[in-house]
Each structure stands twice: as structure tokens, then as C-alpha cells.
Image (spheres, grey):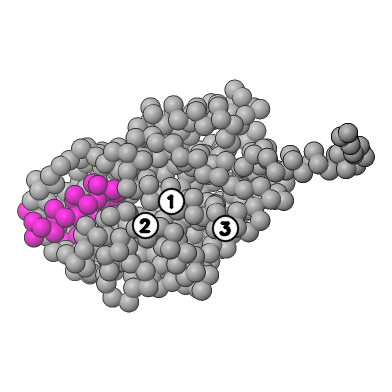
Amino acid sequence: MKKFVKLGAVSALSLVIGASAAFAENIKVAFIDPLSGPFASTGTNGLHQFEFAADYMVNKNGGLLGGTNMEIVAFDNKISPKESLIQLQVAIDQGIRYIVQGNSSGVANALTEAVDKHNKRNPDSRVLFLNYAAVDPALTNEKCNFWHFRFDANADIKMDALTDVMAADADMKKVYIIGQDYSFGKAVAAAAVKTLGEKRADIEIVGNELHPIGKVKDFTPYSRKIIAAEADAVITGNWGADMVGLGKSLIESGYDGPIYTYYAAGSGITAALGESAKDRVRLISQGSINPIENDGARATYEAFEAKYPDGNVDQPRIFNVIGMLAKAIEGAGTADDVVAVAGQLEGMKYQSIWGGNEVFMRPQDHQLIQDMYVGVHTDQNIDFDYDQSGFGVLTETTIEMASMDSPTTCDMKRP
């Protein structure tokens, strides 16, 4: 005869609660960026950094809100604004409340508008857009909204820092500006013209042109024009395959001046440029990897390399996204109420694992203010190289809390 044991009410309830906790939904973050096509390496490396940061900084430390893990869910947008909107809706339909994206300000402009509209129409399924790399200044100026937070410095902030370095070079007389033909490339060009004019009116802009994004196979015609213009320096916001193509073409065509860049490291770019770019390519970035600033940062980078031997931490700000989101969720006491989480992010000060001053999420426009670093492509005094190439980016100049008091035209409407 079978025997049955009757559980008391408290014991039964304990089992139900335990089962619910065991099967609790992860806090999901949708990663919407290119995982195929000419910019796939950039997107894939970014995805790996998000996955690692969520696991290393959150899940291995007990999770959030008493033990809930954070999960990164990848969506391939093929660098297309239209495809990004489709993937955004898929993510929302899956109940995901946090969206991260960074590659292409054109995509970011489409996403921030769509998120704003969705949240107005669907107050029960609102989402936050955490922008980790799209730096069109309009996103935190005339196109700002409550649901968008930018963790990268915008194009104007970066150019202000870069041109501080350039203006100090008394021998620089001629500059050529070249970039991708979309909102970000145009923003870089406009910022370069403005800030150089303010700091060094004697510098002549001998070229200012845009090229189709992701479609140029041979940059030789552009390189020849740059050399013919006798440019002392080149400024470009190019990234991904376009940075590789332009950089290699310039060097192979005989250009020997400095190339000031926004995104000329990691994701195969450093290896592709190699020895030829040594002491010539300069990069504005956040988070100093060389020299590494503390033992915790070193341990983090070493752990990432152990998991992804072919990858790089070439976007340290990704770790700030995860760390600040985790802090905001804990502070709000919930991951479901994104208005409460956004309220925690506004005005947040956060100590990045990479060191430096505390970063600060400026509440009036949701633009992160942080230290900026200008470094040089080199194989000397490198703690960590990129692309297993022996080359990395060595910090030469630090601009503390860059553009803290920079103006904004943001007129944010809050829920």
C-alpha cells in the first residue's frame, strides 16, 4: 500500500516559492547590432564584451534582486535601421525591457524614435534604450528623450578632446577630414571644422568629404587626394571595415602624417594596420587599457582574454553599461519598472572598473560624462595588445571629465 505524506501549509508554500525562484525569468538585455556583413567583427566582439560583462560583473556575484541573472539576447540588425526596428519589436514581444545598440548613429536615431513612440503608446511594456557607441550629438540634444541614455562620449566631446592635442602641434598647418556618409560622419566633420577654427584659426581645412558607408572597396582615390592636398594630419570617424580600408590605403599610398581617429582599434583593425601604423594612428577612447590602471582592471581583462582568446576589450564603456544598469536595478528594487530604473540612472555617479574619475550620467540630457584618453597605436609599453597582433593603444593624454559643462539643447519630457 502506498503511503502519502500530507504537507503542512507552510511547507507547501515554501516549495512553491522555491520552485518560482528556480524558474524565475532572467533579466534580459537585447543586443541589436551587426552580426553579419562587413561590420560583423565589430558587432560580434561587442556582443562578447556584453556577455562577459553580464556574467563576470553580475551573475558570478550573486545576480540581481536576490539572485536573478542577467542575460544578453543577440539580434542581428545587419547595420540596417529598418531591420533594427523589426528586431526591436521582436525583442519587445519577447518581454525584453532593455535594449543596447551602438554601431551606427543612423540605427540609433531610428531606435530612439521608435522606443519613444512605443513607450507613449504602451505604458505597460516600456523599454529603455542604452546606447553604448552611437555618438551623433543630436541624440542627446534636439532628439533627446527620457528613454535614451548614452554611455559613449558624443562626437563633439571626442572632437574637443582630440583637437586639444592637435592644436598643441605648432607644425600642423593643413588638415584633411574624411568620413562615412551618414549622421555620425557628418557630425564628426562639423565638430572638426568648428573646434579647429576656434582653437587654431591658422590651420587650413584642405579637404572635407564623405564616402558611402560600408561600400568602398578601394580607398586609393581618396588617399591620393589627401596626399595631393599636402595634409599634415587626417581626421576620420571611420569604423569597422571602412577604418581598415582607409587606414591601409593611406599608409600604402605613402601618407606619413598622423591619422586622428575615433574607432581605430580592435575587432581586426589593429592587426590589419600592424607595423605600418606604429606611432601614426591616434585614437580617442574611454578607459585606459595601456597602461592598465588597477589590479581589478587587469584581472578583468585577463579573464576576458581567457574566455575569448581572439577577442579584445576594445570598448571598456560596455562594462560601464552593465555595471550602471545593475546598480540602477538594485536601487530601484525592480527590473520591471523601467521608469524607476531610469530615475536611478539619471545623475548616477559610478566608479568604472577601469579606474579614473567616477563617471557621471548627466540628468539633463542623459549623456555620460567621463575621462577621455588619447592614445597611439604602438608595440611599446603595452600591457594588453589587440587582435593578438603585438600592437595596442598606449595612452598619451588624459582629459579628465571631458566637456562636463558642455551645453545641450535637450528639452526632455519626463513621464
Identified at 34% across, 48% down, the residue is 42
Coordinates of residue 230 in the picture (x, y in percent): 10, 58
Please state which amino acid type lies under the numbered disc 2.
Answer: Gly
Instruction: Give the quarter of the figure containing the C terminus.
Output: top right
For mark 2, what is the residue? 311
Q: Residues within 10 Å of mark 2 (few under 14, many from 20)?
A: many
Q: Is residue 220 left or right of residue 95?
A: left
Coordinates of residue 281 in the picture (x, y in percent): 24, 62
For mark 1, what is the residue? 48
Contact flag, marks 2 and 3 (Cβ < 8 Å): no
For mark 3, what is the residue? 57
Instruction: Give the quarter of the figure containing the N terminus.
Output: top right
Q: Nearer the viewer, residue 43 or 229?
A: 43
For the residues labelled 2 and 1, the Cα–Cα distance comes to: 8 Å
Tell me where residue 273 sits by quadrant.
Answer: bottom left
On whether residue 210 falls in the magenta region, the answer is: no
For the residues labelled 3 and 1, the Cα–Cα distance comes to: 14 Å
Where are the magenta residues, as a range? Answer: 228-254
- Residue 304 has which mark? none
Q: Secondary structure at mark 2?
A: loop
Q: Is residue 325 left or right of residue 37?
A: right
Please state which amino acid type lies under the numbered disc 1.
Answer: His
Identified at 60% across, 54% down, the residue is 59
Coordinates of residue 384 in the picture (x, y in percent): 37, 69
Please state which amino acid type lies under the numbered disc 3.
Answer: Met
Residue at the farthest front position: 1
Identified at 89% across, 36% down, the residue is 3
Q: Secondary structure at mark 1?
A: helix
On whether residue 233 falls in the magenta region, the answer is: yes
The vertical placement of 383 against 271, above or below, is below
Q: Nearer the viewer, residue 52 or 97?
A: 52
Q: Residues within 10 Å of mark 3 (few under 14, many from 20)?
A: some
